[in-house]
Amino acid sequence: MAKDKDMRRRRLPPSVSARLPKYYRTLRELIGTDILRVSSGELAKRMRLTPSQVRQDFSYLGGVGQQGYGYNVKDLYSAIGAVIGIPRNYSAIIICRRQQFGSALAKDPCFSTRGVNLKYIFSEAGDFAPSEHEVGITELGTRAKFSSPAYERAADYCRRTCADIAVLACDRTEADAAAEALESAGIRGIWNFTGKDLSCDVPVLDMNLSDMLLRLCCEITAETDE
Amino acid sequence: MAKDKDMRRRRLPPSVSARLPKYYRTLRELIGTDILRVSSGELAKRMRLTPSQVRQDFSYLGGVGQQGYGYNVKDLYSAIGAVIGIPRNYSAIIICRRQQFGSALAKDPCFSTRGVNLKYIFSEAGDFAPSEHEVGITELGTRAKFSSPAYERAADYCRRTCADIAVLACDRTEADAAAEALESAGIRGIWNFTGKDLSCDVPVLDMNLSDMLLRLCCEITAETDE
DNA sequence: TAGATTGTTAATCGATTAACAATC
DNA sequence: TAGATTGTTAATCGATTAACAATC
């Protein structure tokens, strides 16, 4: 008894949760085209998976489909959104170096389109709200001289105002100190662009650009030699 | 017979090749500290793997270790580098929008530190060699009016001069056309920052920032509910 | 030689695919 | 009802871990 409930509660296997964002994105696109229902076969074709895998994955969401019909696109979209945590309206801050990577991220639509509230950007050239950022960085130049590193001001902000996610794109040499400061200020996840592996208790998503570039090189090499 | 040779030749499982860049990076660090030899146990500790996995992984490289001693750091480093394709000196070009993501990538050390030759940057604000790029983007502003989109000029360049890797960070709407143009111009791999899935015959490494952000959200949510 | 550590085989674990009864 | 399609169980496949003989 209550077998399906147990099923629903079982922690999602990592392989499944890694696919959720892509399901979510594909379903968004379907919503945009006014398609109301979708079968595991159709979704599998769009995402280049097997129908089996799609159904197996969705079984962890607990009975979100209907036999003979398929899945209601909007229901499925919000069921997946709920598991990801979209309704929690997470907030984010960026710690970056002027004109570098993280700074460009501030303009990326990934935050606004996914319901994550980008609140503030901290860099050695000044601290900015996203709206001020473009002007701030390119025209104002350096806003002020700071005695504290950007990550400390970010941690202070975090303590005062709360923020869930830190996009960490500071210098490698500051990475450990920054992660520690942010963690003790209550940050709940770190998107790590520093290229340094962090040891944290909160979830860390590593974006090691060098590693990624080499991964592509490796594939190219394997392709050549095959 | 020739059993070990067969082993060496067997195509690397994807799980193993995905770890090679991190091995490579860790070994680089060891070289930097003048450590000459390393055991599977030591390496496992640094990389948070099991010694078994390290040895299993390296077995695909074919007898690069020595019983009772471990692995010679430099030998291992170059054996892994060879599989990745470092000695092939791959070259790269960037197709991006002004001041956006790809443009910031041009300044990232991942290319130079990994022996990938970044040759040229194409954007609607002008085409630049990496050395001209910072000045070009921020001070010169728009260099010229172009009648062709950046990806077409990139494809032309690729046909004339050759380039192995395209960092594709153009607008989503141009993603398919750009990939097709670059592929037919002879590009061998695409690092895809457009947020759109490509269908290509060459290896594609997807950097879907929205998906990645949601993956982190998902982990935070799971952590909270556990 | 004795201790250390590899390379490899076997055992386990997890993820994917296939099959099919349940049911809309 | 008949056709479609799910949810779930069983079979397969691949990746990780454990164990140990080979050997430096």
Image: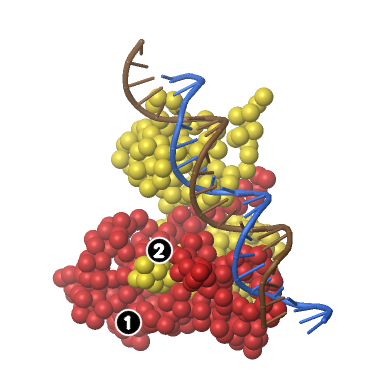
Chain colours: A red, B yellow, C brown, D blue
Give the label on residue B24, or none.
none
Q: Which chain carries label 1?
A: A
Residue B20 falls left or right of residue A27: left
Three-letter code for the amino acid on which mark 1 is drawn: Lys
State the image coordinates of residue A6 (x, y, percent, origin top left).
Answer: 47, 68
Residue that mark 2 sits on? A205
Residue that mark 1 sits on? A119
Residue pictured at 26% horizontal, 66% vertical: A183
State the image coordinates of residue B96 (x, y, percent, origin top left).
Answer: 52, 72
Residue A38 falls left or right of residue A206: right
Q: Mark 2 lies on which chain?
A: A
Observer-nearest of B171 and B125: B171
Ranked by sequence position, the earlier of labels 2 and 1 is 1
Label 2, secondary structure: give it.
strand
**Mark 1: few/some/many CA within 10 Å (<14, 14-19, 20+):** some
Residue pictured at 58% horizontal, 46% vertical: B13
Observer-nearest of C6 and B89: C6
- Outermost residue, bottom direction? A34
Observer-nearest of A34 and A192: A34
Mark nearer the viewer, 2 or 1: 2
**Residue A158 figure quarter:** bottom left
Q: Distance between the residues labelled 2 and 1?
A: 19 Å
State the image coordinates of residue A8 (x, y, percent, origin top left).
Answer: 49, 70
Three-letter code for the amino acid on which mark 2 is drawn: Leu
